[in-house]
Amino acid sequence: MDEKASFTADTLELLFLNQVAIRAALEELSLWVSQRGSAQIHENVMGALRALDVNADAISANIAVLRE
């Protein structure tokens, strides 16, 4: 792997880890909101988090390609 691809993969991996951390924080907040009676808001947030999960799979696969 050349230096540019390595740098790109490292940067994308850090962004990916940030996305995972933000997802976890949003899920915690969503659960807290749900416990206080706002089930609809919780469902809306969980729908958005599912989209993050789908994108996370693609990001991981693309990082792996860069690292080859």
Image: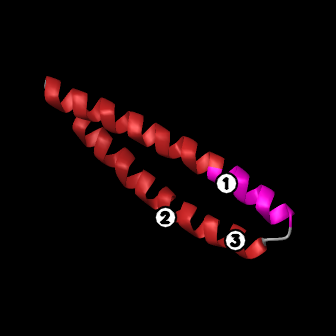
Position of the C terminus by quadrant: top left
The answer to whether the residues at label 2 and label 3 have Cβ atoms under 8 Å apart is no
Amino acid type, label 1: Glu
* Looking at the image, residue 41 lies above or below residue 32: below
CA separation, marks 2 and 3? Answer: 16 Å
Q: Is residue 28 magenta?
A: yes
Magenta range: 26-36
* Residue at which label 3 appears: 41
The amino acid sitting under disc 2 is Ala
State yes or no: discs 1 and 2 in contact (Cβ < 8 Å): no
If you read the primary sequence from the N terminus, does the residue marked by circle 1 or circle 2 appear first?
A: 1
Closer to the chain start, of discs 2 and 3, is 3
User: Which residue is rendered at x = 70% and y = 71% of the image?
Assistant: 41
Query: Is residue 40 one of those drawn in magenta?
Result: no
Check disc 2: other Cα within 10 Å, few if <14, some if 14-19, many if 20+.
Answer: few
- Res. 46 mark: none
Q: CA distance from mark 3 to mark 1?
A: 11 Å
Magenta residues, dominant SS class: helix
SS type, badge 3: helix
- Residue in front for this viewpoint, 10 or 66: 10
Residue 27 picture location, percent across and down: 67, 54
Quarter holding the N terminus is top left
Q: Is residue 51 above or below residue 27?
A: below
First-in-chain label (3 vs 1): 1
Foreground of the two, 59 or 65: 59
- Which residue was labeled with disc 1? 27
